[in-house]
């Protein structure tokens, strides 16, 4: 047990409570309809008090967005740390990220809208999240190089290539377009994972089950 | 010389004039601010007369969009038909499509906005365009298979994989995000083309100049 700084803890608790209320409001009426006054009233605080913890509405939006994407990062990390071949983990990780984005669109529309705004405005929490996913992918690519599953020259470039090639399967705007329309040029999830695996130099022999052609 | 059907020609000419005026208006004040009444007034026609040629505002928007993307398809076709190795033509084609999208965003913002709406609404002209680009890519992949530059099992899947992996470089919403922000996970144009070439089984030996690592 350590002796925490009580002031810091109080601040943290207040921030957490504000974000909890904001998240609830966002889910109920949407982030763009939620005002700082709504959040303050629910907490029995003044608006000015909220601004002690968050300098702006965007800061609140961005922090709630950070909570939402944290779930995705945790799933990705759990898969990356599991005990399986790197190529299998990469396929599972991409599949999980895609499913999460699609489910959010269908079942948690308000948070989907928040993510659209986050990507559009390049909020700091979404950028931090993207960097974290990139770091996880780099570690996976390195692992696959060591096991001989992958064959690439530049780990950083390969990891960025994976994210870019997979963007249509998790970027909120593109996921929405995929679900809505019959995109003539659309490719299936498995086909795109195969395409990515091939770019990583994976031979058919080590392709995870369900991904091989 | 053939004897054209005068009625069909008149109809076609009227459609063309309406689209020319619409395109001019779109460039000047944006497609969402342009009304059918504006277009009708400029042509000295009634609004009802416009609707004889185009059943809806969306039909006009979609047709103007068709003119805008036609340019891109023509550039792509010209490259695909030129006399060069398939891998070089593919790299040139992707580069040209990316440059065109970026230039439109910077220099022709109103048409960029029109394309954003077109992708969002899955307009018929943009779908037809995407199918045309897909067909051009399939032909290129087949060509590269014959010359031994590419090594893929499924031509259709490979062509769709290319489009999907390259989407962040030409989808209007993503091009806008690339230009605006410093995306932490961004990859360079050349790196992504290399990634795609590798997925197509291109060996380093045949990579076009400027694309090799």
Image: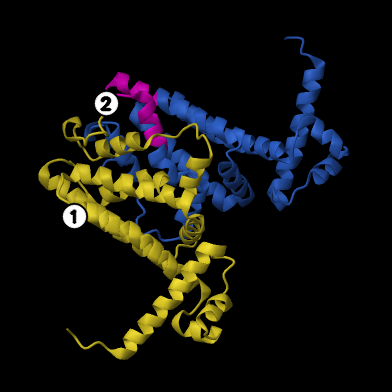
Chain colours: A blue, B yellow
Q: Start and end of the magenta stretch?
A: A140-163
Q: Looking at the image, which is closer to me, B55 or A205? A: B55
Q: Is residue A16 left or right of residue B137?
A: right
Instruction: Give the quarter of the figure containing the C terminus of chain B.
Output: top left
Q: Looking at the image, which is closer to me, B1 or B65? A: B1
Pinpoint residue A74: horizontal percent, then vertical percent: 54, 30
Numbered tag placed on residue B81 in the rendering:
1
Pinpoint residue A54: horizontal percent, then vertical percent: 75, 33
Labels in figure, total: 2
Pinpoint residue B74: horizontal percent, then vertical percent: 29, 59
Residue B138 visible within the image: no
Pinpoint residue B76: horizontal percent, then vertical percent: 28, 54
Q: Is residue A183 left or right of residue A172?
A: left
Residue at horizontal 48 percent and vertical 41 percent from the top: B178
As measured in the structure, the alpha-carbon distance from the residue carrying label 1 to the one carrying label 2 is 33 Å
Residue at horizontal 35 percent and vertical 32 percent from the top: A88
Residue at horizontal 48 percent and vertical 67 percent from the top: B24
Residue bearing mark 2: A151
Classify mark 2: helix, strand or loop.
loop
Q: Is residue B138 left or right of residue A188?
A: left
What secondary structure is the stretch in magenta mostly built from?
A: helix
Residue A3 visible within the image: yes
């Amino acid at each position: 047990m350590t002796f925490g700084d009580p002031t810091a803890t109080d601040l943290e608790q207040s921030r957490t409570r504000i974000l909890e209320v904001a998240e609830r409001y966002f889910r109920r009426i949407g982030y763009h309809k939620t005002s700082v006054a709504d959040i303050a009233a629910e907490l029995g605080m003044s608006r000015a008090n909220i601004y002690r913890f968050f300098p702006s509405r965007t800061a609140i939006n961005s922090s709630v967005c950070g909570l939402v994407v944290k779930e995705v990062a945790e799933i990705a990390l759990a898969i990356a740390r599991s005990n399986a071949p790197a190529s299998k983990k990469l396929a599972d990780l991409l599949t999980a990220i895609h499913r999460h984005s699609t489910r959010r669109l269908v079942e948690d529309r308000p948070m989907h809208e928040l993510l659209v705004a986050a990507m559009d405005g390049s909020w700091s929490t979404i950028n931090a999240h993207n960097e974290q996913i990139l770091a996880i992918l780099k570690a996976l690519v390195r692992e696959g190089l060591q096991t001989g599953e992958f064959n690439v020259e530049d780990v950083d470039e390969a990891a960025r290539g994976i994210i870019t090639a997979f963007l249509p399967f998790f970027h909120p705007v593109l996921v929405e377009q995929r679900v809505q329309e019959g995109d003539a040029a659309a490719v299936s999830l498995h086909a795109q994972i195969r395409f990515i695996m091939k770019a990583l130099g994976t031979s058919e022999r080590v392709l995870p089950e369900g991904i091989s052609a």
